[in-house]
Structures are given as C-alpha cells and as structure tokens.
Amino acid sequence: MAVTARDVRQSTHRSATSPPGRRPGRLPGTGGWNESARTTLAGYLFLSPWLAGFFGVTALPMLASLVLSFTNFSGSFSRMEWVGLENYRIMFTVDPAYWGSVRVTLLYVLISVPVMLAFALTVATLLNKGIRALGLYRTIFYIPSLLGGSVAIAVLWRFVWGESGLINGVLSVFGIDGRSWIGNPDTALITIMVLNVWTFGSPMIIFLAGLRQVPVELYEAAALDGAGRRARYWYITLPSISPVVLFNGILATIGGFQAFTQVYVVSGGTGGPAGSTLFYTLLLYQRAFTELRFGYASAMAWVLLVAIAAVTAAVFASGRFWVHYGDGEK
C-alpha cells in the first residue's frame, strides 16, 4: 500500500507532540509502570490482607514458638534461658502425664474417627437412594457438625451423660440403673467419642457429593453381568469414592488429634476422671496456661505438629494401594 504525503505529515505531527521520555506500552500518570506491573501490584494489594494475617497470625507465631521450645520461657523474657533439648527430654522421659495423654488421644483417633466416617458413609448411602426432601435431610444431618464443636453442646453433653441425665432417664424406663457416664473412668472417653461421631454431618455431605458422581453406567453394566447389590457397592461404589474417603479420612484424623473444646468442657479442664480424658491438647493447655511453662508447651505443640504431618504423609502414601482415580490409575 502506498504511503501518501498526508500520512507522513500526520506521523511527524504525532511524534512532535508526544511528551518527552514517553515509551510505547506505558500509560500516562503511571510513573513508568507498564500494564503488567500494574496488574501484578494490584494482585498483591488484594492479597495483602491475607498475607498480613498469614505472617502476623500464623507464620511468625509458629517460628516464635519453635524458638521458645528451646527455652524455659514462663512469661518473662528477662528470666528466659536457653535450655536446648531439655524440654523434649523432660517430655519423653520425665513428665508422668505425657504418655498417658498420648495413649488417650490415639485411642480417641483410632476408634472415633473410623466409626464417624463409617456412620457418615452409611447415612450418605441411604440419602443417595433418591428420597424426597433430600435438601431438608442434608440440612438436618449437617447441623451437628456446626454445633458439635461449640461450648454450649459440650455443656449439654455433660447433662445428657450425667448421673441424672437423659441417658439414665431413658434406661430407668426399662428398669436399668444408670451411672455417671462422665464420672466413670471406664466410660468417660466413650462419651467424648460419641460426641465426635455425632458430628458426622460434614463428611456425610462430602460423601453424598461423591456418591452422586459415580456413573450410573457402571452399575448397569455390573447388573447385566449378574453382580448383586453388595458386589456393586464393594467393587464399584467404594473404589469410585476412594479419593473422597481419603480426603475425609485425613481431615477427620487431623481434627481428632486437635480435639480440645469438647473434652475441656466435659471434663472441666482437668482431663478426669483419673486422666481418662486427658487429651494431648488438654495437657498442652495445662502446661502453658495453668503452670505457665510456655517453653515446654511450645515443645509439645511442635511434637504434635510433626506427629500430625507424619500421619498425614503415611495416609497419603497408603493411598497408592487403595485409592482409585477416574483415569484408572491409583
């Protein structure tokens, strides 16, 4: 295409009227910032509240607690001394309540978490049958997950399982003498487990979402081959939702290790009777805020963090043997 004299004059006029120092791709009033830099800056500005919260509330306090775990900090920095691994030595070899709290916590996780997941999966399977008012049932079953970790429910639990509580009232109708379930060392931990199982709503909702994603064609093909309901559930349903089982299992396990509010309220903060409900987190709380041994409590917190990370990694690693994904790979 031919360039006319008029085009040359217009190009010369635009060059002459352009501000000095202006480069292509930069906008007026940006101080030399191009569009990409402005977009990046805007993104970090939107992220700044989260970054401030992460570093101010999570990252920096975690680093501070790691440092304190090697000291005898008791609330006064002027008296704080570096003790190295002494807190960890006392924890593993001297503290008489430490291994008891580990045993109680492991019992709680190993029993209540599988039972809660099995119950949640059972209810989700029943709700997946296409019953009416499904949304209403999902809401009703989800409510305990919202309330189960509250102080009010924990206080109510004391009355339900107390000597003159609801459970004993029901048993008395059948002529059975009840007991103080919370005040008995043999049954106190069981009441906490039942409370955890009662909060099955959240994993149930996730299980239900996974069940509704299983292709119907798989069930139809298995039925044509003569597979019964149990075979279809064992060889189709469970493998298809195994990633959901892994996800719920990890979340429930982490929550089990971190359980605190319910046991604190139900036991009155003592872990009784006879240490039967002395969870790891409750002992950590006692060492920190009752005895003011913040350095020792920080060491306990870091051991708990490492233990949770190790268990989570082990569960993830085991998934290669039993978790099936949509592409047919484990």
Image (spheres, rainbow, N blue to C red):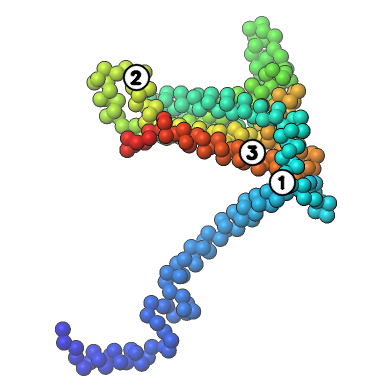
Find disc 3 in the rendering and name its residue. 304
Residue type, numbered disc 3: Leu
Which residue appears at 52% of the width and 38% of the height? 313
Residue 321 lies, in percent from the top left, at 42, 31
Separation of residues labelled 3 and 2 (CA atoms): 40 Å
Q: Earlier in the sequence, mark 1 or mark 3?
A: 1
Q: Could you classify mark 3 by the number of other residues whose Cα lies within 10 Å: few (under 14), some (14-19), or many (20 or more)?
A: some
- Which residue shows up at 44% across the image and 34% down it? 319
Q: Which residue is mark 1?
A: 69
Residue at the far left in the pictured view? 1
Q: Amino acid at mark 1?
A: Ser
**Neighbour class for label 2 at 10 Å: few (<14), some, many (≥20)?**
few
Which of the pair 132/241 is nearer the observer?
A: 241
Identify the residue shown where x is 34% and y is 26%: 236
Of all residues shown, which one is farthest toward the top?
175
Quarter placement of the C terminus: top left
Q: Are marks 3 and 2 in contact (CB under 8 Å)?
A: no
Q: CA distance from mark 1 to mark 3?
A: 13 Å
Q: How many marks are shown on the rendered structure? A: 3
Residue at which label 2 appears: 231
Q: Give 7 or 54, whichever is nearer the viewer.
A: 54
176 to 199, vertically: above or below = above
The percent coordinates of residue 225 (x first, y second) are 24, 20
**Image: 239 above or below 33:** above
- Relative side of 208 to 142, left or right: left
Residue 314, labelled with which disc? none
- Classify mark 2: helix, strand or loop: helix
Q: Assign a secondary structure to mark 1.
A: loop
Task: Please state which of the two labelled residues, at mark 3 or mark 2, is closer to the viewer.
Answer: 3
Spot occupied by residue 272 in the image (x, y as percentages of width and height)? 74, 25
Q: Is residue 16 visible?
A: yes
The answer to whether residue 135 is seen in the rendering is no
